[in-house]
Image: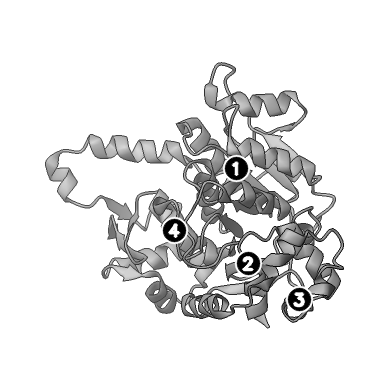
């Protein structure tokens, strides 16, 4: 039963390696729960101090966590489940239990790439992360990130804009949005792919959670891409963990005198693959995934990422007060470059502000495509998002 998995997972002070050793001996947490102390001592590598923690048989906290999961639509994935990713199961220290929201992809059949980098990134780093996230997703790869602000968030936005499958790994409970500015990304990722966490609902972020979380990021992936990182960075910890797990490591080069590129430049000097476009990664795995990876370079949209937002900001700053009051016009009869999904959504939003669920129902467009289209429209400045996943139009349609 799941409550025994939660009980084992939440025993304070019990090391993950001890949990895994117990599972190897007894097969499941319920058998561990009812095992005689003398039987527990026969566990290979058992530490008497660790096994003493097993005397806590209070299931009330586990029952509360399960109730919270049901209320929040959070599901559980145990180490013994068939859906547990084989890549992750084969690392040195796989989590015994994962909480997740979304739809589990068949990860072992897909190319997944962890994209990481510094939180305090430069405009160059943001632009690179968004473009690479877009290119990887468009080319058939799954983008995995920690959803932190900066590089992680930028890569995820790019992948969502491409309509790709994304995976987020949080260092907190899935109902705790950290950082707060990534709250919408949590919701978008849960629809386009899946959110994972080793921590139960209500768990606040803590400094020690993130280095531990990194092993899951790289464990779910075949490769790790570091976009921008100083010499001392959590992103470099992820890269080192990836190498220990036998994963490939790639990095984006930067100016030799830029402090936030020193980590990436060092990785490249030490043998990491140099990346200037998504194809630098995709072509390495094309033979492995011939039916998943596109056989040619992906054409990137104009003004993706920082450039697009800068152009919008400059145009807005140049507006006169009268121009600022009126919504800019968007002529749908001309060469606007919008998809059919985007035009349908704009027409619905022209009737008034709406939530995502309402847009899905009104347009009959699948949820993943709606989120992808809304992300593109938001980046282009055609719609704006407010609390509660509500969207409003920012242009006047002309047809």
Q: Nearer the viewer, mark 1 or mark 4?
A: 4
Marks 3 and 2 sit apart, C-alpha to C-alpha, by 12 Å
Q: Is residue 16 visible?
A: yes
Q: Nearer the viewer, residue 143 or 277?
A: 143
Sequence-wise, which precedes: disc 2 or disc 4? 2
Crowding near pointer 2: few (<14 within 10 Å), some, many (20+)?
some
Q: Earlier in the sequence, mark 1 or mark 4?
A: 1
Task: Give how far apart the Cα atoms at labels 1 and 4 are.
Answer: 18 Å
Q: Residues within 10 Å of mark 1 (few under 14, many from 20)?
A: many
Q: Secondary structure at mark 4?
A: loop
The answer to whether residue 378 is above or below residue 350 is: above
**Is 187 in front, or is 370?**
187
Distance in Å between CA atoms under marks 3 and 4: 34 Å
Name the front one of labels 3 and 4: 3
User: Is 98 placed left or right of 126 in the picture?
Assistant: right
Residue under pointer 4: 177
Q: Position of residue 294 (x, y in %)?
A: 72, 52
Left or right placement of residue 362 versus residue 236 in this view: left
Q: Residues within 10 Å of mark 4 (few under 14, many from 20)?
A: many
Relative placement, left or right, of 250 versus 39 is: left
Element assignment for label 1: strand
Q: Say which quadrant the N terminus sits in.
A: bottom right
Real-space Cα separation, disc 2 to disc 1, in angstroms: 31 Å
Residue 11 — which label?
Answer: 2
Which residue is depicted at the point 70% across and 29% down? 267
Q: Earlier in the sequence, mark 3 or mark 2?
A: 2
Could you say which quadrant of the image residue 25 lies in? bottom right
From the top left corner, tell me how far across and down residue 312 is, in percent.
34, 40
Q: Name the residue at 63% across, 32% down.
A: 252
Q: Which residue is mark 1?
A: 116
Q: Which residue is mark 3?
A: 32
Vertical side of 313 occupied by 40: above or below: below
């Amino acid at each position: 039963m799941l409550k025994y998995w939660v009980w084992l997972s939440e025993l304070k002070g019990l090391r993950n390696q001890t949990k895994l050793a117990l599972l190897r001996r007894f097969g499941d947490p319920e058998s561990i729960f009812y095992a005689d102390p003398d039987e527990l001592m026969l566990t290979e590598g058992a530490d008497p101090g660790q096994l003493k923690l097993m005397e806590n048989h209070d299931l009330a906290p586990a029952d509360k966590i399960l109730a919270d999961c049901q209320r929040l639509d959070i599901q559980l994935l145990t180490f013994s489940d068939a859906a547990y990713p084989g890549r992750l199961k084969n690392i040195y220290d796989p989590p015994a239990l994962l909480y997740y929201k979304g739809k589990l992809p068949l990860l072992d059949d897909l190319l997944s790439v962890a994209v990481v980098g510094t939180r305090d990134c430069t405009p160059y780093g943001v632009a690179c992360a968004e473009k690479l996230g877009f290119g990887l997703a468009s080319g058939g790869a799954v983008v995995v990130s920690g959803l932190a602000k900066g590089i992680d968030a930028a890569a995820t936005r790019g992948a969502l804009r491409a309509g790709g499958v994304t995976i987020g790994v949080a260092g907190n409970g899935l109902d705790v949005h950290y950082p707060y500015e990534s709250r919408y990304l949590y919701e978008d990722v849960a629809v386009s792919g899946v959110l994972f966490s080793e921590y139960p609902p209500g768990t606040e972020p803590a400094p020690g959670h993130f280095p531990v979380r990194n092993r899951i990021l790289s464990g779910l992936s075949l490769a790790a891409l570091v976009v921008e990182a100083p010499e001392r960075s959590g992103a470099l910890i992820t890269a080192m963990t990836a190498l220990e797990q036998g994963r490939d490591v790639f990095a984006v080069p930067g100016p030799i005198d830029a402090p936030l590129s020193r980590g990436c430049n060092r990785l490249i000097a030490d043998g990491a693959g140099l990346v200037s476009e998504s194809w630098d990664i995709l072509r390495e795995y094309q033979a492995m995934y011939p039916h998943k990876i596109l056989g040619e370079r992906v054409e990137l949209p104009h003004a993706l990422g920082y450039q697009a937002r800068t152009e919008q900001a400059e145009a807005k700053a140049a507006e006169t007060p009268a121009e600022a009051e009126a919504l800019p016009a968007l002529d749908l009869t001309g060469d606007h470059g919008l998809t059919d999904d985007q035009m349908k959504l704009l027409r619905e939003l022209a009737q008034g502000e709406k939530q995502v669920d309402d847009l899905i129902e009104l347009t009959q467009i699948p949820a993943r495509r709606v989120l992808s289209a809304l992300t593109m429209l938001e980046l282009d400045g055609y719609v704006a998002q407010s609390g509660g996943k509500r969207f409003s139009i920012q242009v006047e349609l002309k047809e």
